[in-house]
Image (cartoon, rainbow, N blue to C red):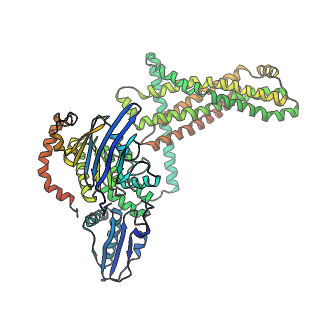
Amino acid sequence: MLQVDTTTNIIIQVSNLCTRFGNHVVHSGVTFQVYRGEIFALIGGSGSGKSTLLREMIMLHQPDSGSIEVLGIDLQELAEAATLSLHTRCGVVFQQGGLFDSLTVRENVGLPLREHTQLSNALIDEIANSKIEMTGLSAESADQFPHQLSGGMLKRASLARALSLDPELLFLDEPTAGLDPMSADGIDELVRRLRDLFGLTILIITHDLDLLWQVADRVAVLADGKVQATGSMAELAAMKNTAVQAFFEGPRARAAAQQSEKLTTAREDKVTSCTGAPS
Amino acid sequence: MPKAIRLSHAARIISNEAQSLALSGQWTAFGLGILEKQIDSIRRPRNTKLFADATQIELFDTAGAWVLQSLLLRLEKDEVLVTLIGLRPEFGKLLAFVDHQIATQMAIPHKVPLKSHSLLDRLGRAVVSVISEAMALLTFVGESANAFGDWIVHPSRIRWRPILFNIRSAGVDALPIVGLLSFLLGVVVAYQSADQLMRYGANIFIADIVGISMLREFAPLVTAIIIAGRSGSAYAAQIGTMEVTEEIDAMRTVGIPPLGLLMLPKLIALMIALPLLTVFADLLGVAGGMVMAQSQLAVSYGEFLDRLVKAVGIGTCLVGIGKAVIFAAIIAVIGCFQGFRTRGGADSVGRQTTRSVVEAIFLVIVADALFSVVFSALDL
């Protein structure tokens, strides 16, 4: 949904967030902002609390203290109706897809529209088809059931469902995990294209260094319960912080950085062709 | 947001004037409301010059763009010379994208929906599926027998721990419910017979009725039905979920035969536990009848037991226990078989679990009927 009045440019404001599971402290004062229209990535080692943070931002888990504001709404003490309305403004792509197994892909994608709007079934099917096509799935797969799809197709179908209500904010949990490099590249491009076309704000949780270099505008590094650093990949690479440097060492990280340099020049003209109205 | 859209913000088209359309409001999935259905009534004669003024559109999303573009395309098809003016540039980008999407969808040939099948066709399909299921069950029984043979030849491969675990979960844990229900069944049988017996002054024969009916029929049957619902369904759900999460495939790849680990321990455990449960049900069923006999027919416990020993031979008791062994095999085999047939996801697990219970109870009762025929032929 294209918002016209930009009353605020901060889409997500997380302040001094603390989370504990029993004695295990996951977050001890996490603070960061996400601005309108940017692609923001959250990285951190396994068990650093990325997924918990995501669950808190999409109102599936209540933090112990601190505050989260999403789209200008404080998530604490939110009434049920307001929660529902906020859910319809955010799209979430879960790591395992989270598609409903008893529905076809088209029914999955159309479900939020059928549930929340008064549109006709024919129009909903057309919009669902369009979302499915947009995420790069073939027309045949629209009639298939989730368990008949491969991993990469599941991710795309799940993305199509997250987009069905044209959300303002999109959460992606490990969008490229378990995908082959070709599919992962496709996701890179898809994410950029979505932002340009719909003015989406996108928050990604990922380990994929290629995705980070190619797509993320800003990256926050989560370690020891805090945000260690925030900045573009190039800025982070220059930092001395050990928790940050852990991501930039090793052959895979260096290869991704080099690859990114090569691609940046090649992309300049590609961007215009794929983001401009494809007519 | 779904209900928060006030009427003043809803998407609107004002088409009072012949040469212009005024579009306003929130052209979003929520804001469109029932506008989509009204839009068909907007018609103009051929070659009319029409200006669609989109200046007042506040919000625009895919659904809105779709409805607007469909309207424009339809008007163009009616040969109306329509021009869209005043759409904000960022909305224009979305409209162009949707235009492209509509064109792509037009290019895809629409699939003709399959014709509904005739009665004969459906009957044929149903028969084929029943036959193929029966064949699969036969294959499964064969494979299980094969795996069992393997255990007999190599006793070291027998997995005692899961067998003992299953005896506890299917047997010991079921004692309270089996005991309670068979006690109540004994009470009911005695109560229903009491009235008839009293008329003939044949009060003491209550022991014959309760003893034979409980030991021979009711105890094995009611125990088997409870266990089919309690353990058979659990087997199907457990194995079905493992099938969905690829645990069964993983088992095969690390060289553990799934039948040996999942199926045989359950089968053996149930074939031990169910006869024992049946004996327990016998005891409590007779106890229930005994309580009723004393209160309704004034047959004391001593007289009742005295008569029971004379009326009910060891054969009757063994027939009941022997049936329980067969019922146990049916429940375990059907539960595991349906579990292994699970394909797909959560939906399928539920379906197979239901089938396992229905089929197990069905086959238990069919087997019981066959036993009656066979025993009467053999005069047992």
Given residues B51 and A81, the one toward you in this image is: A81
Can see residue B137? no
The image quadrant that residue A56 belongs to is: top left
Report x, y in % for residue B113.
Answer: 41, 60
- In this rendering, the count of numbered labels is 0
Q: Is residue A262 left or right of residue A215?
A: left
Residue closest to the eye, A95 or A29:
A29
Image quadrant occupied by the C terminus of chain A: bottom left
Q: Where residue B199 sits in the image (x, y, percent)? A: 87, 34
Residue A115's place in the image compared with B214, above or below, is: below
Residue drawn where x is 29% and y is 38% of the image:
A226
Query: Nearest the camera: B216 or B162?
Result: B162
* Residue B71 in view in this figure: yes
A18 above or below B70?
A: above
The image quadrant where one finds the N terminus of chain A is: bottom left
Quick check: A56 above or below B239?
Answer: below
Is residue A37 placed above or below B91 in the rendered structure? above
The x, y position of residue A15, in whole percent, is 33, 45
Task: Looking at the picture, tell me which residue is in the foreground, B17 or B365.
Answer: B17
Place residue A200 in its image quadrant: bottom left
**Residue at image location 21% in from the left, 41% down from the top:** A209
- Horizontally, residue A110 falls left or right of residue B237, namely left
Residue A277 falls in image quadrant:
bottom left
Q: Is residue B282 left or right of residue A124?
A: right
Residue A127 locus on image (x, y percent)? 35, 60
